[in-house]
């Protein structure tokens, strides 16, 4: 397909064209979470099977997307948006708390969100890998947003005298890699620990980065 088909306009069954389009998109993404995030996975899913799982037609698929890769891209962004919203809400709720409590709130929110549904883990850490240069660029861009969030928290903590003042970009990049790897391995059953134990370990790692040996508050 060279591009998306043009969707019908006007009201139908009491819904506007925009409302119908949004509903179709939700149904396609919901079906994609089921198929891409479980069996058969992104690479074995067809437009026909995705449309059938969504209860829609292939024509309606091409009114919303050009390719299955477009669906995976949208789903990957959605899963990351859910996690980011959970983290930002947790940080808002932890406003004014000491750094260790803010860090714990942030990672409990992130871990709870991405592990609440194992299919989200698979979309974020498995299915997105190696699909195309475009999706790799998207994956790295979303990862960079998480790095920026860690750096912003670190800078704010340093301004409050709760962390060492320095450039945290490299350390944050390395730390995000360990977060993703540990949560993926835990969800796959390769790490014998509770989720709380995993989160506690991540918090300890972050505090070790923000408060290196020999540093003390007020320096």
Image: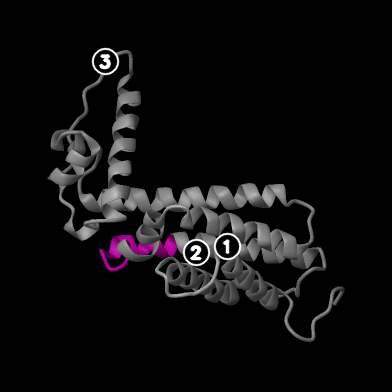
Can the viewer see residue 203 in this picture? yes
Give whichever of 192, 97 is nearer the camera: 192
Which of labels 2 and 3 is toward the front?
3
- Residue drawn at (29%, 15%) of the image: 11
Q: Secondary structure at mark 3?
A: loop
Kindly indicate the quadrant of the structure image that contains residue 120. bottom left
The answer to whether the residues at label 2 and label 1 have Cβ atoms under 8 Å apart is yes
Q: Is residue 134 left or right of residue 163?
A: left
The disc, 3 or 1, on the residue closer to the chain's N-terminal end is: 3
Report the residue marked by disc 1.
Answer: 148
Report the residue marked by disc 2.
Answer: 144
Give whichever of 93, 134 is nearer the camera: 93
Report the residue marked by disc 3.
Answer: 12
Q: Which residues are magenta?
A: 128-141
Can the viewer see residue 4 in this picture? no
The disc, 2 or 3, on the residue closer to the chain's N-terminal end is: 3
Q: Position of residue 140 (x, y in %)?
A: 42, 65
Which of labels 3 and 1 is toward the front?
3
What is the spatial separation of the Cα atoms under label 3 and label 1, in whole angstroms?
44 Å
């Amino acid at each position: 397909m060279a591009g998306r088909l043009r969707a019908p306009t006007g009201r139908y069954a009491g819904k506007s064209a925009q409302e119908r389009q949004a509903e179709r998109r939700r149904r396609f993404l919901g079906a994609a979470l089921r198929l891409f995030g479980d069996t058969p996975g992104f690479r074995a899913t067809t437009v026909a099977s995705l449309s059938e799982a969504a209860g829609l037609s292939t024509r309606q698929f091409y009114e919303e997307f050009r390719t299955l890769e477009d669906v995976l891209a949208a789903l990957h962004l959605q899963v990351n948006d859910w996690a980011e919203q959970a983290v930002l809400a947790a940080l808002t709720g932890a406003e004014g708390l000491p750094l260790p409590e803010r860090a714990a709130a942030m990672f409990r929110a992130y871990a709870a969100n991405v592990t609440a549904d194992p299919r989200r883990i698979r979309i974020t850490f498995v299915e997105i890998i190696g699909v195309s240069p475009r999706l790799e660029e998207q994956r790295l861009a979303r990862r960079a947003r998480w790095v920026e969030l860690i750096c912003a928290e670190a800078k704010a903590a340093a301004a409050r005298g709760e962390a060492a003042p320095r450039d945290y970009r490299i350390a944050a990049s390395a730390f995000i890699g360990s977060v993703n790897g540990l949560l993926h391995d835990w969800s796959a059953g390769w790490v014998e620990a509770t989720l709380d134990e995993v989160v506690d370990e991540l918090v300890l790692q972050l505090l070790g980065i923000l408060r290196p040996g020999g540093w003390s508050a007020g320096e």
